[in-house]
Amino acid sequence: MLIAVVAVVLRLPAFFARRSLVFDDGVFGASVLAMRAGGAPFREVFSSQGPLFLPLAWFGDLVTFRTFDSPRALAVASGVVLSLATYVAGRELTTRPRALLATGLVLCSGSVLWTSAPLAADGPASACAVLTVALALIYRRAPSAPRAIVIGVLAGAAFAIKSLLVIPALVAVGLLVVSRRRSTDIVVVPGIAAAVVVLASIPWGVTQVFDQAVLYHTDAAGTRVPLENLEVVVRALVARDLPLVVAALVAVGAWLWHRGTGRGSDEPGAGAPSGRDPGWIGRLGAGRTPIVVWALLVGGVLLAEHPMWRSHVAHLVPPLALLVATARVRWPTLAVAAALAVPVWVVSMQPLLLPAGPDATEATIGAALRSLPPGAMVISDEPGIVWRNGRRPPDRFVDTSILRIESPRRDLQITEDDVVRDAASPRVCGVVRWSAKRFGQFSDLGARLRREGYERRFPSLPEPRAVWLKDQCRPNGPPPPAWPARRGDRATATAAPGRSPD
């Protein structure tokens, strides 16, 4: 219970933060508002994540009574589940104090907080993956058919939230299940997992899910840059996870010391059958080996994927925390490391633990959006500023990321024509440009909006930020045009870079 309370308390400042804390926070917050209004994921509401993510976010919003901040409910729940699952996994691997150490490292992980306080898919995906590993560790100790069924359901759910980055955890789960050599369970677990993914996709259309959750990312993939990715991972860990980094360095030092002195680890090889040779399969599933495999595979994915975002580093934290907790490190040494690292961590986490209010530009734009008629829609390349000021964009514009603007697929892409077309709808009363990399690429946007009856307000805003408002708008009028469903069409042209002085 105390673990859950601490996890919630750490996330409350971000839950109530007036600003959108990261881009994804705004995207998924706007997506939840679109689903409140009846939009369906992958059909009306674009979704770049797995088929289970937005429905879970919708459910979290529903059970917290659809308040202003309710779209972030799933993030907070994910942080609680992830922390508790880490403790359960730790108890299967080591002693209670060491399991609490692993939990503490996850609780104070900045990478985890940044994906489970603001709304992001990495938080619930990691929570579900770690919970699956924890149950698989229990299964290793006491295998049973009901546990195998639940493992299959959780594995499928994790994959249906965010596929690529949970695969390493699912490999560890596979090692744990296979090591018990129960042939029925070995078939049941992946079969149920696959069924969960298919069943989660069918309501929204398997083709639409595949296009948005898979092809959208593969179209964006470019040349792998492992050294650049490594730099991003290291910088993220040092900036956000200094307690874990210091503890890991101490653990490695302790391991090298004991190897040099010929002393073995004091941790038992949990789960290994006694009295006979377990074979190579049994050895892969014994002790900490599945956790080591999990950590190594996450590291490999982070180095290989493109594009790789800092939020993905959160998936590396739970296996590293478990490995640190099971290492042979003396408590006084860890106490000294914590005394050095925790104060620095507190300072680095200030944006989440004590979020700042809107700056002058955000306050000006926010006041303009709040002054619009009730029910007015607003299009922006920063959906969070729309959501956090009581408005919502048309369903097509809940995600206005650079990947959508640069997508070669016309049915997934956002162009200047799309912005102007939806802005012409009577329900849309404002357009906000925030980023030079997103709507700033649309060189003729200001002039075209003027022809649709928009007027640019606050010309003194720093470029590229701009606000266009339309006086003659009717929030109860006809909805914006339907999302074009030309599957597989390739974009024939892209907007010229640059910005209109408008």
Image (cartoon, rainbow, N blue to C red):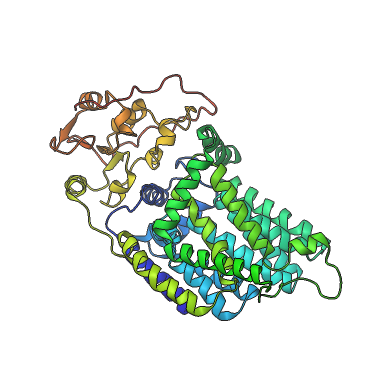
Which of the pair 379/158 is nearer the observer?
A: 158
- Which of the pair 258/428 is nearer the observer? 258
Q: Nearer the viewer, residue 376 or 228?
A: 228
Q: Residue furthest front?
A: 261
Q: Total marks drawn?
A: 0
Residue 321 placement, left or right of 420: right
Q: Is residue 436 above or below residue 13?
A: above
Q: Residue furthest right?
A: 276
Q: Look at the image and tell me whether residue 48 can be seen.
A: no
Image-based side of 375 in relation to 361, left or right: right
> Which residue is at 70% across, 69% downward?
287
Q: Does 49 sit left or right of 348 as displayed?
A: right
From what the image shows, is residue 434 above or below residue 296? above
The x, y position of residue 281, in whole percent, is 79, 60
> Residue farthest to the top?
492
* Image position, residue 400 (x, y; %): 38, 38
Task: Choose top left, top right, bottom left or bottom right for residue 241.
Answer: bottom left
Locate residue 253: give its quadrant.
bottom right
Q: Is residue 132 visible?
A: yes
Q: With respect to residue 359, does 250 lie above or below?
A: below
Image point (69%, 71%), residue name: 262
Q: Is residue 388 above or below residue 94?
A: above
Front residue of 265 and 172: 265
Give the side of residue 415 with respect to residue 233, left or right. Answer: left
Position in image of residue 242 (x %, y %) = 42, 62
Q: Quadrant of the C terminus?
A: top left
**x, y percentage for residue 79?**
46, 65
